[in-house]
Image (cartoon, rainbow, N blue to C red):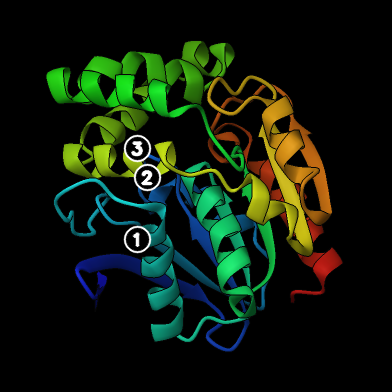
Amino acid sequence: MEMIQLGDVTLHYRIEGDPNGASIVFANSLGTDFRLWDQIIPYLPDGLKILRFDKRGHGLSSCPAGDYQMADLIQDTVRLLEALEFRECLFVGLSIGGIIAQGLAASHPHLLRAMVISNTAARIGTPEMWQQRIDTLRTGGIEALADNIMQRWFSKSFRHHRALEVAAWRNMLTRTPLEGYIGCSAAIAATDFSESSTGLSLPTLAIAGSEDGSTPPDVVRATAELITGSRFELIDNAGHLPCVEQPAEYARMLNDFIRECGHV
């Protein structure tokens, strides 16, 4: 188990692969830990140094009190990458992880060589929507939203045919520290990177799931269109977590992008 103290937070992380390889970093969605990428790692090519981590308030990382700002999450990531000497990375971020990727690319471009922004947007939802969700969380906990979240995370077919797996992901969600989930929700609510992402120019792959109820394909595509050097890909029959539902297809897209970038 690998832990690191970074200012006011302790982050849980894992490094795998070739210690001298090209750097690739994975950042998770809201309500998940770095096991989100378990099915993708075996598909990755040799010659990569792989970093996964739990953001603050998630997984085994610490959970500072109070609402978080996106700047906190970005700074946590910057400190982690610098402490572990991960530079010129291919950064793969899903949902809030994709927002962090956009923030990193704008504020610390030397750390990113390319990025994958998956099931995300420059702005997700509205402050009013997030405040309503936070109010529900404070009243009923994550359990009050869990069934609705499963419907957004996974396609109808996946929920029907792989119910035991869905139950496991639901357990991961509901075991997320409440204050961590609320803190990150507040960070998303206050973030709009539409202007800063418009100024980005780096190789970017944007991935969407055809049945994503959180960040529908049109929202992901619109964000990709802000970024010079980006392209958009759609995974059919997948919701908000296509790396879970369609890992082989997700990995194919990612590996094609790795080769295009010359990142191995």
* Label drawn at residue 187: 2
Q: Position of residue 15 (x, y in %)?
A: 43, 73
> What kind of residue is marked 3?
Ser
**Residue occupying the point 26% across, 37% down:** 182
Mark 3 vs 2: CB contact within 8 A: yes
The residue labelled by disc 1 is 72
Mark 1 lies on a secondary structure that is helix
In depth, the one of 2 and 136 nearer the eye is: 136
Mark 3 lies on a secondary structure that is helix
Q: Residues within 10 Å of mark 3 (few under 14, many from 20)?
A: many
In depth, the one of 183 and 30 nearer the eye is: 183
The residue labelled by disc 3 is 185
> What kind of residue is marked 1?
Asp
Q: In the image, is residue 222 above or below residue 57?
A: above
In depth, the one of 237 and 105 nearer the eye is: 105
Which circle's residue, 3 or 1, is located before the other in the chain? 1
Q: Residues within 10 Å of mark 2 (few under 14, many from 20)?
A: many
Q: Residues within 10 Å of mark 1 (few under 14, many from 20)?
A: some
Give the farthest residue toward the front. Answer: 195
Residue 252 visible in image: no
> What kind of residue is marked 2?
Ala
State the image quarter where residue 186 is shown: top left
Q: In the image, is residue 46 above or below residue 160?
A: below
Q: Where is residue 33 in the image (x, y as percent from the top left)?
A: 35, 48
Which circle's residue, 1 or 2, is located before the other in the chain? 1
State the image quarter where residue 60 is shown: bottom left
Q: Where is residue 127 in the image (x, y as percent from the top left)?
A: 42, 29
Mark 2 lies on a secondary structure that is helix
**Residue occupying the point 75% across, 74% down:** 263
Q: Distance between the residues labelled 1 and 2?
A: 9 Å
**Residue occupying the point 59% across, 39% down:** 120
